[in-house]
Image: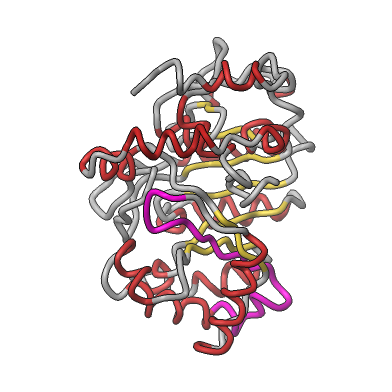
Amino acid sequence: MNRRLHDFSGTLAEHGHRSLTRARPTWLQANLGKRCNQACRHCHVDASPTRTEMMDEATADRLLWLLERNPALELIDLTGGAPELNPHFRHIVSRTRQLGRRVLDRCNLTVLFEPGQEDTAEFLAEHDVEVIASLPCYSEKNVDAQRGRGVFDKSIEGLRRLNALGYGTTRTLSLVYNPGGAFLPPGQASLEADYKRRLHEDFGVEFTNLLTLANMPIARFATDLAREGRHDEYMQLLVGAFNPATVDGLMCRHLISIGWDGALYDCDFNQMLDMPSPGSTRSIHDLTDADDWEGRPIRVGPHCFGCTAGAGSSCGGALA
C-alpha cells in the first residue's frame, strides 16, 4: 500500500483542515462485547458465537457514571457483537432511561430468537429504545450471502415482531445497508425509497429510515479484500472519492467510544484497530474529569477514508 497516497492527515491538510479535533461530545458509544450469534463477512468487529470478550459489571457501572456526570451526553449507543447478549444490557438500558437519555440498540434482528431473548423486543419497546437494525438488502440471496443462510427470513420475522410493537410507526426503527462488495453505497434517499417500497409490498414491513454505511477496510472485510487481491483497489476508490463536506459531521468528532474492557477510543473503528484515544488516560476506570474531551486531537489512519468517501459514512448513515 502506498502510505503517502493513503495519508489521511495530509488529505485533510490539503482541504484546509489542520487536524481533526473533537467537538463537545453528545454521543456515548459502548461496545458491550464481541460475542454474537452471527459471523458476518463484513463485520469490522470480528464478532462471532465463539468470542468470549464481554463488558463486566464494574465497567458497565462506570459507563453509567460517565453518563450521570456529563449531561451533554444525550444518548448512549449500544453495540457489539450482539449487545443484547451482555448480561448487563438491561441494567444499562433501564438506568440510562431513568436518567432521561436516549438509548440506541444496534440489533442484528436474529438475536431476538436466541434462548433467553424471547422478551427482548418487548423490553426494548417498554423502555422506548431506538432500534438500529442490520439488513444489508431487501433480497434474501444478498443478505444470506453476506450474513449466513437463513438470516434474511429470520430478520424479516424480527422486523414483523418489532412492527407489532409500534417500531417503524410510533417508535424509531432504522435499518442499515452496507454494500455486498468493494464498492460505495448508492444514494441514501433513493435507496431508502426502494427499501420502503419492497419491504412493504413483499413482506408488509415498515421502518423509519435507512442508514447507508461503507464497508471499512479492516478486520474480516480487509481480509477478504486481500484474499481477492483488491485491497489497494478499494483503498484507491475510497481515497479518490474523498469528500471534504463530510468532515464536520464525522462521528468521531461528536462521540466517546468505549471498548468492552473500558478502554477509550475516538471511534468504533479505531477501537477495532487498537488505536486508543490520545492522552494519558486510556480507560474509563481512570477518568476523573470527562469534561476535557472538547478540542482533543483525534487519531486517524487510512481507514478514515471509509467515512469520508462519497456521501460519507458514519454510525448515523450518510453525512453529505
Of residues 238 and 105, the one drawn nearer to the viewer in this rendering: 238
Residue 52 percent across, percent down from the top left = 28, 44
- State whether the magenta stretch is mostly helix, strand or loop: loop
Q: Quadrant of the N terminus?
A: top left
Q: Residue at x 64, y 67 (%)?
A: 190
Residue 184 percent across, percent down from the top left = 49, 50
Magenta highlight range = 162-183
Residue 42 included in the magenta stretch of the image: no
**Does 34 sit above or below residue 9?**
below
Of residues 20 and 264, the one drawn nearer to the viewer in this rendering: 20
Residue 286 percent across, percent down from the top left = 55, 19
**Does 33 sit above or below residue 279?**
below
- What's the colour scheme? secondary structure
**On the picture, is 87 further left or further right than 129?**
left
Visible residue check, residue 133: yes
Q: Residue furthest top?
A: 280
**Does 155 sit above or below residue 241?**
below
**Does 194 sit above or below residue 43?**
below
Q: Residue at x 33, y 61 (%)?
A: 146
Q: Quadrant of residue 173?
A: bottom right
Residue 174 included in the magenta stretch of the image: yes
Visible residue check, residue 69: no
| Number of numbered discs visible in the structure rendering | 0
**On the picture, is 104 further left or further right than 144?**
right
Q: Residue at x 62, y 52 (%)?
A: 317
Q: Residue at x 33, y 63 (%)?
A: 147
**On the picture, is 315 further left or further right than 269?**
right
Of residues 120 and 191, the one drawn nearer to the viewer in this rendering: 191
Residue 209 percent across, percent down from the top left = 66, 66
